[in-house]
Each structure stands twice: as structure tokens, then as C-alpha cells.
Amino acid sequence: MIPEYLELTRLVERLHRRFLDVLRAELARSGIRDLNGVQALLLVNVGEDEVAIRDLVERGYYQGSNVSYNVKKLTEDGYLVQKRATHDRRSVVVRLTEMGRGVVGRIREMESRLANDLASGKVDTSAVNGTLDVLHALERAWTDYVVYGPR
């Protein structure tokens, strides 16, 4: 199991980077030059909600050390609106602007196209479900390791 585990952990990381490449390619095809893949993914994770920046990081929706830079840039470029939370003035919440919703709509369309391509005979639905089960188990194992340490 060790070689397979090592391959799985490396593959997860490569897939994340490849998905950011896919997002960049979709942005370029759409004529959007002022966003990178990480920023586009951040917009998708905000979605239709008003979200505290801290929640984006804590829920694992944003991976990176420069969330404040990206939020500032997305706000300056007109994709996000940010304000202080009413319940905690130290916390900042963000929501999409109309322009941000347009980008998210394009990305959702792309995701739908890619999912349909994958489902059109290339991958069995049960295989996808099995893969999801394995990835969720891996996420739980890694979370337990972070929280509780080695057993």
C-alpha cells in the first residue's frame, strides 16, 4: 500500500495544479486576463454567499498564504466587495459583484462541460463514486493526523 499511497498523495497535488491550469485556460479563452487560477477558484468558493475571509481559509476553500493579497486585488479589480462583519468588526466578509458572478458562471459552465465529457463513456459513475470515497477517507485521515497526531 505504501507505493500506492505515495502515488496518490503526489497525484492529488498534481491534479490541483492541473485544475488551476484548466481555470487559467478557460479565463484566457474568455478574454479575462486580470485573474489567475487561484483567484478564479476563490471566486467560485465564495459563490452566492457572503463569506468571512477566515471561513474560506478554515474550511479549506482557499489554500495559500496570500489570501489578503488576492482579496484586495479581486476587490480593486471589481470582482469582490468586502466589508466589516456586523457581528465582529475585526472580521471581513466578501461577496461577489456582478462581474464576479459572471466569471463564476463561465467556470460553472466549463465544469459542466468537463463533467459531461467525462461521463460520456470515459469513466463509469461507480468509479467516480469510489474515488470520492477514497479521497474523503484520505481527507479524514489527514485531518485526524493534524488534530490528534500520529497514533
Image: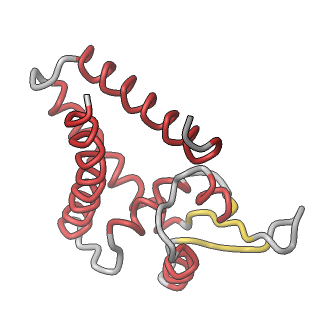
113 w.r.t. 26: above or below = above
**Residue 34 location, x and y as percent?**
34, 80
Residue drawn at x 49%, y 77% is: 70
Q: Quadrant of the C terminus?
A: top right
**Residue 14 location, x and y as percent?**
23, 54
**Residue 85 location, x and y as percent?**
81, 67
Please tell me which residue lies in front, 57 or 47.
57
Please tell me which residue lies in front, 27 or 61.
61
Q: How many marks?
A: 0
Residue drawn at x 86%, y 73% is: 89
Q: Is residue 83 left or right of residue 72?
A: right
Please tell me which residue lies in front, 151 or 118.
151
Residue drawn at x 41%, y 59% is: 41
113 w.r.t. 32: above or below = above
Residue drawn at x 24%, y 19% is: 127
Residue furthest to the front: 151
106 w.r.t. 95: above or below = above
Residue furthest to the right: 87
Q: Quadrant of the N terminus?
A: top left
Q: Which of the colour schemes (rainbow, by chain, secondary structure, one colour) is used?
A: secondary structure
**Residue 68 location, x and y as percent?**
58, 78
Identify the image quadrant of residue 86.
bottom right
Identify the image quadrant of residue 116.
top left
Q: Is residue 124 left or right of residue 130?
A: left
Residue furthest to the left: 122
4 w.r.t. 52: above or below = above
